[in-house]
């Protein structure tokens, strides 16, 4: 057997000892290895995961060719050491003056995609274009994936359109790019187009479509895709099973998610983690925590993603002690070295109002990425610590990190909450330069920022030029018009949304009902309230009931408002009772007003606004002693403050 075949055989069997023995034999023989033998040694060490040995072989090679460089660059890229992969690519091109081949380009572009190194990736693409080299579909697929990961969907689409006879990989790359940027509806349209073009379905396209249906909560469509995959005999590997569990969990059917897990050929920790994540998404946090504990009974060890999902459940439960214990387990297991796990720990502490601990975790991280900065910024914003958020953003820029779409989204959120229209416009300019204004996440954030700053015309302009809109974009525009009393315009947007085939959700109907409240259209509001569950499968929430109660009360029909509340299956909260109380104050309904105030104070005895309105009810009824007693009870309340 030749030396080359022997080295290939040992690399395929992942036999480190035998591979090293052959290498030792070559050294002891005193025979000078040729470039082909060195390349086989380099490839063997790369395949068995000994990247340090591979680098030593490379550094000692008296002669190197394009295969040598490509093997090393590919090895670094595949194990995630992307920066070193790009350093090798530069050395190959600039110092050794060796022209890359298609495999070299694939490895280098993949490294750029991992790092989201937009400038470097564009340089490589520019080199391909300038040299006029005819590259194969593998390189073009990598370029589609690269531009998708960097959020430049137009560029991804342009590259895709140059692919002659795109196959499954090409279509999946394009679909994944749109899904990754939040353009899930367009992702599904691309999938349907690929089916019409006769492209086959494999486990990757199947899993990606299931993930898209999960994000959109399209249960029926996802089940149709599942039937198609079963009919075509798509392999139910670990990737598919995990996505199937995730899909049913996100769509609110935990029983089917559990069934998918049970019927898998082999229960794996990733699918189990997906089930925990589904519980967290549906607010079943106690069950998620229980599943995390139960995992050990099946002989499974939690991985880094399992810990992240469990932390999410504990964060929503505000279980500080449990989260701190889990943090200790993460450190003990060594998972704190994973940057995205530390990001989740950071996020957990922010959610339980321990921002100082979030900063401590951030400072202790060995390596930070843009997601780490984004998590800290988002934590500051969610806790209304806007000055801290701005400080973090400045530190991020000074450390040389380039903002991505989620950084800009958080920054625009700060500008909207303050409000700071001038900063918002500057951020908008910064977004336009790299072409991120067409991204659906940034576009929605821009609409929201301009709306909160009272610039509805600017908000509408941004909304109208968005190339693709999702449910968040439509809801943001509807809510903005509703909040500023432009009920007619809000309803026009809602009509256009339905016409475009976008399915409204619970947030949509809060905006619609608020808009109808401003127009005083009671019949229209009741009709839309009824159509929520009937036509769109949206369960009414207390916020929806509050909108109807407010509208009835404005028309002086407080008794009907109360009857509507009592007949509703929705549990009433302070918001609904406060809407009724406000109506009773306006209509001098003492009896019902007292009852509503009593309900509010039963839920929250420290609710000062309820006491203020109760005092007004007494005063309007000439019950001055009672009004005085209520006013005295709120003298100790804290003074409010404003950012504006």
Image (cartoon, rainbow, N blue to C red):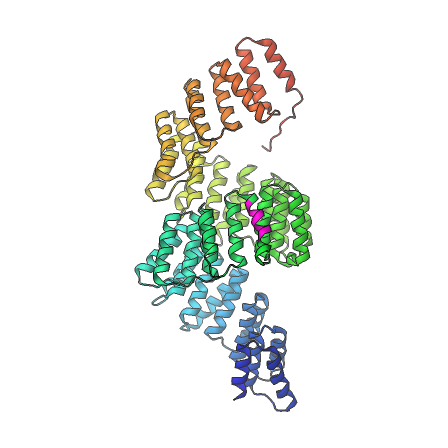
**Count of numbered labels shown in the rendering:** 0
Residue 212 makes an appearance in the image: yes
Predominant SS of the magenta segment: helix
List x then y, in percent, for residue 576.
49, 27
Residue at the location (64% across, 40% down)? 353
Residue 321 vertical position relative to residue 96 in the rendered view, above or below: above
List x then y, in percent, for residue 549.
44, 24
Residue at the location (50% across, 61% down)? 266
Magenta residues, start to end: 287-294
Residue 371 makes an appearance in the image: no
Quick one: 238 or 51, which is closer to the camera?
238
Quick one: 491 or 99, which is closer to the camera?
491
Residue at the location (44% across, 54% down)? 244
User: In screen coordinates, is 622 left or right of 354?
Assistant: left
List x then y, in percent, for residue 535.
34, 38
Quick one: 139 or 605, which is closer to the camera?
605
Which quadrant holds residue 529?
top left
Whether residue 288 is in magenta: the answer is yes
User: In screen coordinates, is 154 left or right of 425?
Assistant: left
Whether residue 450 is in magenta: the answer is no
Residue found farthest to the front:
297
Instruction: Report the quarter where the C terminus lies.
Output: top right
Quick one: 121 or 479, which is closer to the camera?
479
List x then y, in percent, for residue 133.
42, 73
């Amino acid at each position: 057997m030749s030396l080359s075949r022997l080295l290939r055989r040992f690399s395929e069997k992942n036999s480190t000892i035998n591979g090293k023995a052959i290498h030792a034999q070559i050294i002891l023989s005193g025979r000078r290895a040729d470039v082909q033998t060195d390349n086989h040694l380099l490839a063997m060490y790369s395949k068995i995961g000994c990247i340090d040995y591979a680098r030593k072989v490379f550094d000692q090679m008296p002669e190197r060719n394009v295969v040598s460089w490509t093997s090393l660059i590919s090895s670094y890229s595949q194990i995630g050491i992307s920066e070193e992969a790009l350093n090798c690519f530069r050395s190959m091109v600039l110092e050794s003056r060796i022209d890359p081949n298609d495999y070299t380009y694939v490895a280098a572009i993949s490294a750029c995609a991992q790092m989201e190194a937009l400038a470097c990736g564009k340089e490589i693409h520019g080199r391909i274009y300038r040299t006029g080299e005819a590259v194969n579909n593998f390189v073009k697929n990598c370029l589609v994936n690269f531009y998708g990961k960097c959020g430049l969907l137009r560029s991804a689409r342009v590259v895709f359109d140059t692919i002659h006879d795109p196959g499954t990989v090409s279509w999946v790359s394009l679909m994944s790019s749109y899904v990754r940027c939040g353009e899930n509806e367009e992702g599904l349209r691309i999938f349907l187009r690929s089916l019409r073009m006769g492209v086959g379905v494999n486990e990757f396209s199947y899993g990606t479509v299931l993930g898209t249906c999960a994000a959109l909560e399209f249960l029926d469509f996802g089940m149709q895709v599942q039937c198609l995959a079963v009919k075509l005999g798509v392999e139910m590997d670990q990737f598919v099973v995990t996505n199937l569990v995730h899909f049913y969990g996100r769509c609110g059917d935990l029983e089917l998610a559990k069934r998918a897990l049970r019927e898998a050929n082999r229960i794996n920790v990733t699918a189990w983690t997906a089930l925990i994540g589904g519980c967290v998404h549906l607010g079943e946090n106690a069950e998620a925590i229980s599943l995390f504990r139960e995992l050990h009974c099946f002989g499974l060890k939690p991985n880094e993603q399992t810990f992240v999902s469990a932390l999410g459940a504990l964060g929503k439960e505000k279980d500080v002690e449990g989260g701190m214990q889990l943090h200790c387990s993460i450190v003990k297991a060594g998972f704190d070295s994973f940057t995205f796990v530390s990001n989740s720990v950071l996020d957990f502490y922010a959610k339980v109002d321990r921002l100082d601990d979030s900063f401590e975790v951030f400072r202790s991280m060995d390596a930070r990425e843009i997601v780490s900065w984004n998590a800290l910024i988002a934590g500051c914003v969610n806790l209304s610590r806007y000055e801290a958020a701005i400080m973090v953003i400045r530190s991020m820029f000074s450390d040389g990190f380039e903002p991505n779409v989620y950084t800009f989204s958080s920054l625009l959120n700060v500008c909207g909450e303050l409000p700071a229209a001038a900063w918002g416009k500057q951020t908008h300019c910064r977004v336009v330069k790299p072409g991120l204004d067409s991204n659906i996440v940034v576009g929605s954030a821009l609409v929201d920022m301009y709306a909160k700053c009272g610039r509805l015309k600017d908000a509408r302009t941004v909304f109208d030029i968005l190339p693709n809109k999702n449910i968040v974009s439509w809801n943001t525009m509807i809510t903005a018009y509703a909040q500023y009393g432009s009920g007619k315009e809000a309803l026009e947007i809602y009509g256009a949304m339905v016409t475009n085939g976008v399915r409204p959700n619970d947030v949509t109907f809060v905006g619609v009902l608020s808009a109808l409240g401003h127009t005083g259209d009671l019949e229209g509001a009741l009709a839309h309230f009824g159509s929520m569950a009937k036509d769109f499968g949206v369960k009414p929430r207390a916020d929806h009931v509050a909108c109807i109660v407010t509208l009835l009360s404005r028309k002086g029909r407080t008794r009907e408002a109360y009857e509507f509340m009592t007949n509703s299956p929705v549990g009433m909260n302070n918001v609904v009772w406060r809407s009724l109380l406000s109506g009773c104050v306006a209509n001098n309904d003492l009896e019902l007003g007292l009852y509503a105030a009593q309900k509010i104070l039963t839920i929250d005895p420290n609710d000062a606004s309820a006491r203020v309105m109760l005092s007004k009810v007494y005063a309007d009824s000439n019950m001055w002693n009672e009004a005085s007693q209520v006013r005295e009870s709120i003298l100790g309340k804290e003074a409010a403050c404003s950012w504006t």
